[in-house]
Image (tube, helix red, strand yellow):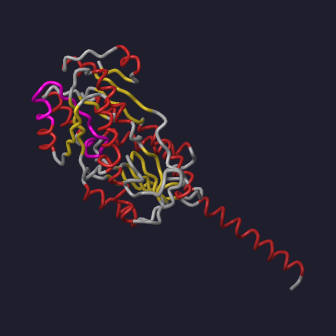
C-alpha cells in the first residue's frame, strides 16, 4: 500500500467515528411521559408544560431534536398499566413518570429504559430503588416529602383550628401503600405529641370518602389530614365538598385543593419539581445513568390558606399563618 493511500485510509478511519458521533448527537431523541392524572386536569397540563419548557431551555426542542410521547393514567390503575405498556413498546430513550402508581406501572414493564419519577412518596419502600444516594437500577427522580412532614401538617392544623381533638389520616391503600409504612408511624407519633387521637381512614371510593368525613364530623373536634395520594388528588373536589358540608377542617398537600375550597395546603412546589426533572432527563439523554443519579428531595414548599373556607368553618386564621402563606384566597 502506498504511503498516500495509507494516510487517506487512516484519516478516514479517524474521521468516521467523529462523523458517527455527530450524526448520533443530531438524531431526534424520544422522551416518554406518563402522567398520573386525566388529560382534562388543568393542573396536570400546567406541570407538563413546565417540564416541556425546562427541556427547551436545555436545548431539547420538540420537532427539532426531540419527540415527546405523552400518555395519561386516566385516573385508574388499568389505564396506568395500558399507558405504561404503550410507552415501553415505543422504545423511548427515557420516560418521565408522574406519581407512585405511574412509576410502579412502568417498573413492571421495563428494567432497562431509564425512568425519572416525580411526586413519589416513598421510592425505597415502593421498591423502585436501593437507596436515595445510589438508586442502583434504571429508576431515579425527585421525591415529594419526608416522613416528618406529618408533624408540619398537624402543627398547621393546630394553628388554624386549635380545638381539634381527633384527626383522621385519609388515603387509598391501593394507590398509596407507602402511607401505611412510611407516613403512618410519624403521623401517630405527631398526634401523640399534640395530644390528639389519631384515626386511620382508608378509602377506595367516593362513597367511602363521604362515609369517613361524615363520621368525623358527627361530633365537634374532628379534623382531617388528606393523604398525599394520587387517588386523593383525583377525588379532591368530593373531599372538599364533604369537609365543608360536615364542618371538618382539613389540610391538603396540593395547593389546588386550597384554591378550590379546601382550608389549607402545604407541600412541595410541583412546578419546581417538574423543572428539575427536566434536568435529570437532559443528563440521561447526554449519557448519564439513572443508577448513578441520586434521588433529589424538594427544595421549595408552598402554603396556601383559604380565608373564605376558614370563615365558613368559624375559624380565625392567626396573623402568623397569613404572613407565612405563599398565597391567601379571600
Q: Which residue corresponds to the image point at 47% horizontal and 63% vertical from the top-left?
A: 113
* Quadrant assignment, res 90: bottom left
Camera-nearest residue between 150 and 245: 150
Q: Which residues are magenta?
A: 213-234
Task: Determine whether, in the image, residue 103 is placed left or right of residue 259.
Answer: right
* Quadrant assignment, res 312: top left
Q: Find out whether residue 221 is within the magenta segment.
A: yes
Camera-nearest residue between 71 and 188: 188
- The percent coordinates of residue 307 (x first, y second) are 27, 19
Which image quadrant: the C terminus? top left
Task: Determine whether, in the image, residue 45 is placed left or right of residue 132.
Answer: left
Question: In the image as oriented, which residue stretches furthest toward the right?
Answer: 3
Q: Is residue 246 above or below residue 291?
A: above
- The percent coordinates of residue 317 (x first, y second) are 29, 16
Q: Which residue corresponds to the image point at 41% horizontal and 41% vertical from the top-left?
A: 146
Q: Is residue 2 above or below residue 43?
A: below
- The percent coordinates of residue 247 (x first, y second) are 15, 25
Q: Which residue corresponds to the image point at 39% horizontal and 67% vertical from the top-left?
A: 89
Task: Determine whether, in the image, residue 154 is placed left or right of residue 301.
Answer: left
Total tally of numbered discs in the picture: 0
Q: Find out whether residue 284 is within the magenta segment.
A: no
Amino acid at each position: 500500500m502506498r504511503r498516500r493511500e495509507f494516510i487517506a485510509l487512516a484519516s478516514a478511519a479517524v474521521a468516521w467515528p467523529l462523523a458517527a458521533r455527530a450524526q448520533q448527537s443530531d438524531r431526534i431523541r424520544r422522551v416518554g411521559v406518563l402522567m398520573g392524572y386525566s388529560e382534562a386536569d388543568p393542573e396536570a397540563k400546567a406541570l407538563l408544560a413546565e417540564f416541556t419548557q425546562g427541556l427547551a431551555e436545555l436545548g431539547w426542542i420538540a420537532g427539532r431534536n426531540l419527540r415527546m410521547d405523552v400518555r395519561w393514567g386516566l385516573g385508574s390503575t388499568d389505564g396506568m398499566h395500558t399507558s405504561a405498556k404503550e410507552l415501553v413498546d415505543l422504545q423511548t430513550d427515557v420516560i418521565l413518570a408522574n406519581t407512585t402508581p405511574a412509576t410502579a406501572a412502568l417498573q413492571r414493564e421495563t428494567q432497562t429504559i431509564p425512568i425519572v419519577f416525580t411526586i413519589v412518596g416513598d421510592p425505597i419502600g415502593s421498591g423502585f430503588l436501593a437507596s436515595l444516594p445510589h438508586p442502583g437500577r434504571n429508576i431515579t427522580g425527585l421525591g415529594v416529602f419526608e416522613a416528618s412532614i406529618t408533624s408540619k401538617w398537624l402543627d398547621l392544623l393546630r394553628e388554624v383550628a386549635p380545638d381539634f381533638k381527633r384527626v383522621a389520616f385519609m388515603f387509598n391503600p391501593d394507590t398509596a401503600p407507602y402511607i401505611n409504612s412510611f407516613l403512618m408511624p410519624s403521623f401517630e407519633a405527631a398526634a401523640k405529641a399534640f395530644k390528639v387521637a389519631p384515626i386511620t381512614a382508608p378509602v377506595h371510593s367516593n362513597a367511602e370518602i363521604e362515609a369517613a368525613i361524615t363520621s368525623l364530623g358527627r361530633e365537634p373536634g374532628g379534623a382531617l389530614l388528606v393523604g398525599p395520594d394520587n387517588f386523593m388528588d383525583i377525588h379532591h373536589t368530593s373531599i372538599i365538598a364533604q369537609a365543608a358540608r360536615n364542618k371538618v377542617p382539613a389540610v391538603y398537600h396540593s395547593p389546588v385543593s386550597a384554591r378550590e375550597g379546601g382550608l389549607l395546603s402545604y407541600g412541595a412546589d410541583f412546578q419546581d419539581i417538574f423543572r428539575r426533572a427536566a434536568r435529570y432527563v437532559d443528563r440521561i439523554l447526554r449519557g448519564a445513568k439513572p443508577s448513578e443519579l441520586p434521588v433529589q428531595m424538594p427544595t421549595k414548599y408552598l402554603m396556601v390558606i383559604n380565608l373564605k373556607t376558614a370563615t365558613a368553618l368559624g375559624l380565625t386564621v392567626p396573623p402568623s399563618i397569613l404572613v407565612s402563606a405563599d398565597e391567601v384566597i379571600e
